[in-house]
């Protein structure tokens, strides 16, 4: 069975929120008939583990529903940046050979300290590092802080350099139980229309072998597992029927069947 690792913060009335934003409220009420218990939930779109849409930082830009769901599901890499004590810099990122089209999650000392309270001195992504990622054309970025930018900073480049390129940002990740390496990310937004962000239940999936993943598709051992836990669809492309490929591509994106030469992330990359 695959291992599923929850990297989301619990949603409770006493959960830490970014200073100046509304506290989360959860109130139990009864239905009109009195036979059922319901909960009235009040929280901001950026409480806990959440996704920033372009309109969060760019006026009149696209809301959360404008982002393709495929961005939020697929291979990702958790980078060990626990040595960063103030900010993540461009030089820090260049040590990890990040590729165009990758999803990257930053594990910093924020995860080591925990999330029982809000800390003003959380590790953030500096402006030049954000520009570097935006120009590189990554698919998604995530960080273990409630904001990707420095606390109280007027410079919002950490947001705008990414969101202006259609790169969503997941904030508020709890990466304390996660070892650096390659995983499958699932972090879909809720189906809000037109708003600036959304809570998400983010998890990482680690497949121990190809049978865990391929068996349910009827592909058996035709899938190959990379050392980091990625499912290698290259071998499947030659052994699966065209109908099977079309069926699965329609669910997770046709990019899984691209040729080895056009693959954006090399499984032979040295691990960080």
Image (cartoon, helix red, strand yellow):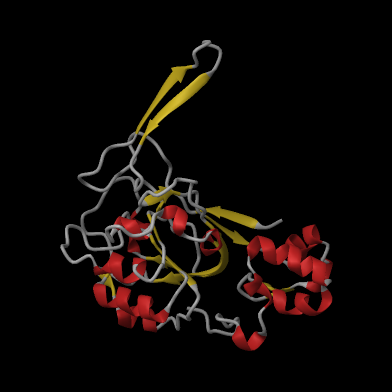
Of the pair 185 and 247, the residue shown nearer to us: 247
**Is 247 positioned to the left or the right of 124 in the image?**
right
Of the pair 2 and 162, the residue shown nearer to us: 162
Q: Residue at x 51, y 19 (%)?
A: 37
Q: Quadrant of the N terminus?
A: bottom right
**Is 167 positioned to the left or the right of 240 in the image?**
left
Up the image or down, 100 lies above or below 7; here it is below
Q: Could you tell me residue 66's position as x and y percent?
A: 45, 58
**Residue 208 shows in this picture:** no
Q: Could you tell me residue 234's position as x and y percent?
A: 71, 79
Instruction: Return the residue found at the far top.
Output: 33
Of the pair 60 and 15, the residue shown nearer to us: 60
**Residue 123 shows in this picture:** yes
Instruction: Return the residue found at the far bottom.
Output: 261
Q: Which residue is drawn at 60% across and 85% down?
A: 262
Up the image or down, 228 lies above or below 184; here it is below
Q: Which residue is drawn at 42% across and 54% down?
A: 64
Up the image or down, 159 lies above or below 113; here it is below
Q: Could you tell me residue 192's position as x and y percent?
A: 45, 45
**Is 217 positioned to the left or the right of 120 in the image?**
right
Q: How many marks?
A: 0
Q: Could you tell me residue 103's position as x and y percent?
A: 49, 70
**Which quadrant holds residue 210?**
bottom right
């Amino acid at each position: 069975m695959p291992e599923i690792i929850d990297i989301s913060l619990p949603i409770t009335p006493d959960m830490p929120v970014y200073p100046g934003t509304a506290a989360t409220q959860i109130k139990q009420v009864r239905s009109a008939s009195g036979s059922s218990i319901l909960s009235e939930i009040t929280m901001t779109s950026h409480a806990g583990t959440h996704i920033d849409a372009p309109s969060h930082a760019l006026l009149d830009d696209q809301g959360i529903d404008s982002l393709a769901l495929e961005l939020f599901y697929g291979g990702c890499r958790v980078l060990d940046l626990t040595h960063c004590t103030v900010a993540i810099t461009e030089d820090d990122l260049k040590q990890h050979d990040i590729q165009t089209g990758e999803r990257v999650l930053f594990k910093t000392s924020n995860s080591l300290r925990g999330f029982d309270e809000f800390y003003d001195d959380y590790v953030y992504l500096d402006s030049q590092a954000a520009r570097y990622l935006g120009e590189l054309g990554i698919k998604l970025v995530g960080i273990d802080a409630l904001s990707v930018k420095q606390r109280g900073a007027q410079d919002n480049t950490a947001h705008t350099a990414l969101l202006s390129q259609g790169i969503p940002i997941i904030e508020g990740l709890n990466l304390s139980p996660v070892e650096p390496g390659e995983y499958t990310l699932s972090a879909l937004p809720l189906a809000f229309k037109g708003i600036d962000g959304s809570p998400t239940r983010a998890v990482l999936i680690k497949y121990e072998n190809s049978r865990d993943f391929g068996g349910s598709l009827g592909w058996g051992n035709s899938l190959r597992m990379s050392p980091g836990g990625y499912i290698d669809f290259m071998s499947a492309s030659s052994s699966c029927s065209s109908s099977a490929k079309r069926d699965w591509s329609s669910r997770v994106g046709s990019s899984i069947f691209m040729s080895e030469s056009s693959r954006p992330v090399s499984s032979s990359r040295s691990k960080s």
